[in-house]
Structure formats: structure tokens, C-alpha cells
Amino acid sequence: MEIFSRFSLEAARRLPKLPPEHPCARLHGHSFQVEVHVRGPLHAELGWVIDFAELQRAWAPIHAALDHRCLNDVPGLENPTSEHLARWIWERLAPALPGLSRVAVMETAASGCIYRGEGAAG
């Protein structure tokens, strides 16, 4: 069984590795949507995989570190593509969420990235 919570954050970024004429090389903002998925067995007594409150607690420091910030200023996100952002979030959530199975980062309503951890297919 797999459950998820969707979180949002507002952040600015620029992608410094792109040519200067590319629009994403300039400072711009996104209303990111992030889904955090946790997989595990259904608890026989409680009837859930994990308490959604645990996901919210694990997300709180991520939100504090990223929301209303310039992502380029966050250590480890000097080139804050959605791919790097998804991996950065995963690395910080994995210790608190042993069943973490997927982090999805949507930078627009139609574009995003899914990260399943190193060595995972896809």
C-alpha cells in the first residue's frame, strides 16, 4: 500500500548552467507542488501505512528551508533544477520516513520530476 501527501512551497531560482538567453537562466519564481509518497504494509490494528501527521512533521523542516527563499542560496541547490530539488528533498526525508518511495516535484501544472532514490528504476 502507498500513501502520499502533497505540499506546496513558493521559491525563486535561476538555473546558472543554462545559456544567458534561456529564460530559466534569469531569476524567476515557481509555486512548487511536492508529493511525498510512503509505501508499506497496512497496519493490522490502526488500518493505515503511516500517520499523515508523520509526513507533515517530516516535511516541516524542508518547508522552512525552502519556502520563500532563493533556492540557489540553499546549500546543495546551487543549480536548483527540479531533478536536483527532488533528490535534495529525498535525502532529507529518507531518515525520517523509512518507507519513502517517491518524491514528485511539480514546478508548473504540466511539468515535474519524480525521484525514487538512488538505484531505483525510474
Image (cartoon, grey):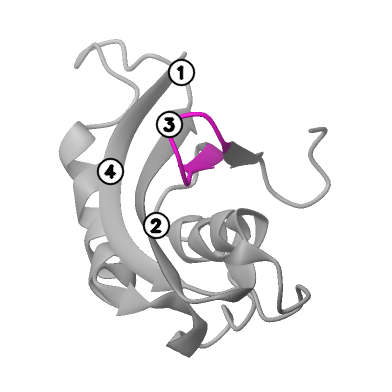
Task: Inspect the image, locate mark 3, and give the three-letter code of the amino acid beneath it.
Answer: Ala
Q: Is residue 48 above or below residue 102?
A: above
In reply to whether residue 106 is colored magenta, the answer given is yes
Q: Residues within 10 Å of mark 4 (few under 14, many from 20)?
A: some
Q: According to the image, label 1 marks what residue?
A: 41
Q: Is mark 2 on a helix, strand or loop?
A: loop
Specify the segment rendered in magenta: 102-111
Distance from Cα at disc 1 to Cα at disc 3:
31 Å
Relative side of 29 to 48, left or right: right
Q: Looking at the image, which residue is at 66% across and 40% down?
A: 116
Nearest the eye: 121 or 107: 107
Give me the disc on residue 7.
4
Task: Inspect the image, locate mark 4, and give the three-letter code of the amino acid beneath it.
Answer: Phe
Task: Inspect the image, locate mark 2, and give the three-letter code of the amino acid beneath it.
Answer: Ala
CB atoms at circles 1 and 3 under 8 Å apart?
Answer: no
- Determine the image quadrant of residue 43: top left
Give me the disc on residue 96.
2
Q: Residues within 10 Å of mark 3 (few under 14, many from 20)?
A: few
**Earlier residue among tags 4 and 2:** 4
**Earlier residue among tags 2 and 1:** 1
Residue 118 pos. (x, y %): 77, 52
Q: Which marked residue is nearer to the observer: mark 2 or mark 1?
A: 2
Q: Which marked residue is nearer to the observer: mark 1 or mark 3?
A: 3
Distance from Cα at disc 2 to Cα at disc 3:
28 Å
Distance from Cα at disc 4 to Cα at disc 2:
17 Å
Nearest the eye: 44 or 15: 15
Distance from Cα at disc 4 to Cα at disc 1:
23 Å
